[in-house]
Image: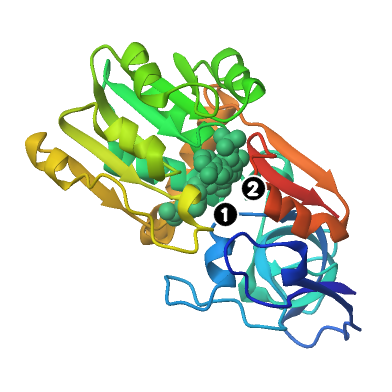
Amino acid sequence: AKQILLAKRPKGMPTLENFKFQEIDVPEPALNEVLIKTLYVSVDPYMRGRMSDRESYVPPFELHKVISGGVVGEVIESKSPDFNKGDFVVGQLGWQTYQLVQSEEIRKIDENLAPITAHLGVLGMPGLTAYFGMLDIGQPKNGETVVISGAAGAVGSTAGQIAKIKGARVIGIAGTKEKLSFLKNELGFDEVINYKEYDVYKQLKNACPNGIDVYFDNVGGEISDAVMKQINHQARIVICGQISLYNLEKADVGPRPQTQLVIKSALMKGYIVSDYASQFKDAAEELAQWMQAGQIKYRETIIEGFERIPEAFLGLFKGDNIGKYLVKI
Ligand code: NDP
């Protein structure tokens, strides 16, 4: 089997040199083990944090060890009573073409419910992140104005549609014309803003005449500075991610939002999706219902080839993807 290891820890923006390929033999499964063939690998921005050796909510990847992330695979051989050959499964598994896993590491997925890739996106970790961030922290109400940064990605595109379901007016910020057209024409966002082409502050002023009640932040930095100046009384600011800061070598210093939070009696709260693990099952069911009812649509950007996983991962920081970014093996 082929596998991808962390070759060295990045300083600033990662490059292909941070990854190393290797071939290994995969032994026969022992009792309770399952042999998995990797079908799809998810690349996710949070993995950048794990490449660095610093304390976080998940331990860092180990140097010269296999990198792991969200994987959908097929059972090739099973010594577990819970899995049969041919089952499709999802789990946090290695960047590896074939691998042995313990049965507790994987969960069976129902290919009749939705395409199997949806379990890495709208019905998986990114969809759940959008769900809990928007509903538990953002709590959009009918008629309120919701702004989303990183709006055309896996989390942002789902978060925006959830806010629409709750009756909010939704404004998405993203980096290309194609993304804006996707948000507006396919997902029904009310207004869209290209942060690369126009002044975000002014665009928001035009798009949000009644101010901003909920800000779902995937990006941080200057985009957030522009949003924070326009929040309303009792606004809710959902800190989901700060992708514009993940590759900075020096700490980012900008306008500090605390005074604005005081003046506006606003709430700013961060979270990790796993905080809500006990509610995943119900949330995934609701997401699936919205999907089947056509209220939540999703897009995937899929490139093909195991050797292209690092390239896809790096592409997240250049905005190469619309919706969930996946690699087909
Ligand atoms: P996306 O699918 O949104 O992919 C990343 C996107 O971020 C890119 O396509 C790009 O779009 C945008 N981007 C990259 N660099 C910058 C930049 N410097 N400034 C502005 N935008 C940038 O990824 P996900 O949906 O998987 O994740 C979105 C966010 O949610 C991330 O911050 C991630 O860390 C966070 N997250 C948090 C979780 C939690 O538990 N709190 C769980 C999962 C994700 P564009 O072309 O628009 O620039």
Give residue 250's position: percent from left, percent from top.
Answer: 44, 63
Q: Which residue is drawn at 61% across and 74% down?
A: 104
The quadrant in which residue 219 appears is top left
Vertical comparison of 312 with 191: above or below: below
Give residue 326's position: percent from left, percent from top.
Answer: 73, 48
Cβ(mark 2) to ligand 1 < 8 Å? yes
Q: Residue at x 50, y 58 (%)?
A: 248
Vertical comparison of 232 with 315: above or below: above
Q: Which mark is residue 310?
A: none
Q: Helix, strand, or loop for circle 1?
A: loop
Residue 123 visible here: no
Cβ(mark 1) to ligand 1 < 8 Å? yes
Q: Residue 45 carries which label?
A: 1
Q: Name the residue under label 2.
A: 316
**Amino acid type at image mark 1:** Pro
**Amino acid type at image mark 2:** Leu
Vertical comparison of 97 with 246: above or below: below
Q: Do the residues labelled 2 and 1 touch (CB within 8 Å)?
A: yes
Depth check: give the residue in front, 63 or 71. 63
Calculate the distance from the C-alpha at mark 2 to the C-alpha at mark 1. Answer: 7 Å
Vertical comparison of 57 with 294: above or below: below
Q: Which residue is drawn at 86% across and 59% down?
A: 306
